[in-house]
Image (cartoon, rainbow, N blue to C red):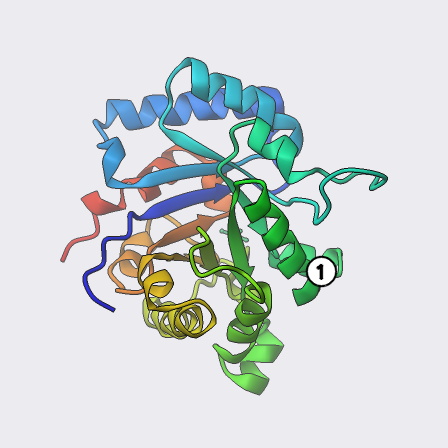
Amino acid sequence: MGVNTRTPLIAGNWKMNLDHLQAVAFVQKLHWTLKEAKHEDDSVEVAVFPPFTDLRSVQTLIDADKIPFALGAQDVSAHDSGAYTGEISGSFLSQLDARYVIIGHSERREYHSETDEIVNAKVKAALKHGLTPVICVGETADDLERFGASAVPAEQLKGALAGVSASADIVVAYEPVWAIGSGQAATPQQAQDVCAVLRGVLASALNDDAAARTRILYGGSVKAANIAGFMREPDVDGALVGGASLVVDEFASIIRFQKHVGV
Ligand code: 13P
């Protein structure tokens, strides 16, 4: 696929943690910790995905203090506006300068019955409103046993991309469900194997250029102690971090993986 010019993306999915006051304190502290460590901001893109109620406060802080983190939401409505109680429009998110939105996280697929069709509609809604979807795919332990690692994530990605333009800006996150919150991460080789298959899906569903430029993240029990192994793999372009993104020093160390990645 040619030279890899993809900027690594380290993304923190806070899930339903940290209220707006805690969020502001956390982002300030993370920024300070990276500054103290003389972290080079351009070497890696950092994104945080707080709960909806935190977004305005975090946006205001990032803007006022010129903090170089991108902002993302954890979900978006497939609809633009109207009688959809409890849903959040992509237009509201782009008004808050959100750059990204997580779509199809396994927790939404499981607890909110999100199908590949719903994920596809949300991906289109995000793109329509100028947001970059972070499309989550991944197999359960049962899928792994029955179909191997890549079959289910590849099908999910195909479904998510139906009717999406090859020029669309998207991010893919491979999150094996059995690795999420379990402390049992995939091995770097397992992550690489599936991410390479997913890059092939990008090439066939979109085109070669989209496959070469789209970042594919690994997620599932990522920590400071294992990030370097994932980032050494050619098709892993970053991480979607859950639990470890809620601990300032741990998340800062993951962001600084280039200091301990080795070669
Ligand atoms: P953990 O890092 O807590 O395993 O969560 C991963 C995840 O679901 C990120 O979206």
Q: Quadrant of the N terminus?
A: bottom left
Residue furthest to the top:
64
Q: Position of residue 42 (x, y in %)?
A: 25, 35
Q: Nearer the viewer, residue 191 or 161?
A: 161
Relative to 236, residue 87 above or below: above
The residue depicted at 44 percent of the width and 50 percent of the height is 169
Relative to 147, residue 47 above or below: above
Quarter of the image where one finds residue 33: top left
The residue depicted at 58 percent of the width and 40 percent of the height is 129
Q: Position of residue 84 (x, y in %)?
A: 82, 42
Q: Secondary structure at mark 1?
A: loop
Q: Is residue 199 left or right of residue 135?
A: left
The residue depicted at 47 percent of the width and 42 percent of the height is 12
Quarter of the image where one finds residue 18: top right
Q: Which residue is mark 1?
A: 114
Q: Quadrant of the C terminus?
A: bottom left
Q: In the rendered picture of this protein, how many numbered marks are placed on residues?
A: 1
Q: Position of residue 38 (x, y in %)?
A: 21, 27
Residue furthest to the bottom:
146
Q: Position of residue 63 (x, y in %)?
A: 44, 18
Residue furthest to the left:
263
The kind of residue tagged 1 is Glu
Answer yes or no: disc 1 within 8 Å of ligand 1: no
Circle 1 Cα neighbour tier, 10 Å, few/some/many (<14 / 14–19 / ≥20): some
The residue depicted at 20 percent of the width and 66 percent of the height is 2
Q: Is residue 103 left or right of residue 29?
A: right
Q: Nearer the viewer, residue 84 or 81?
A: 81
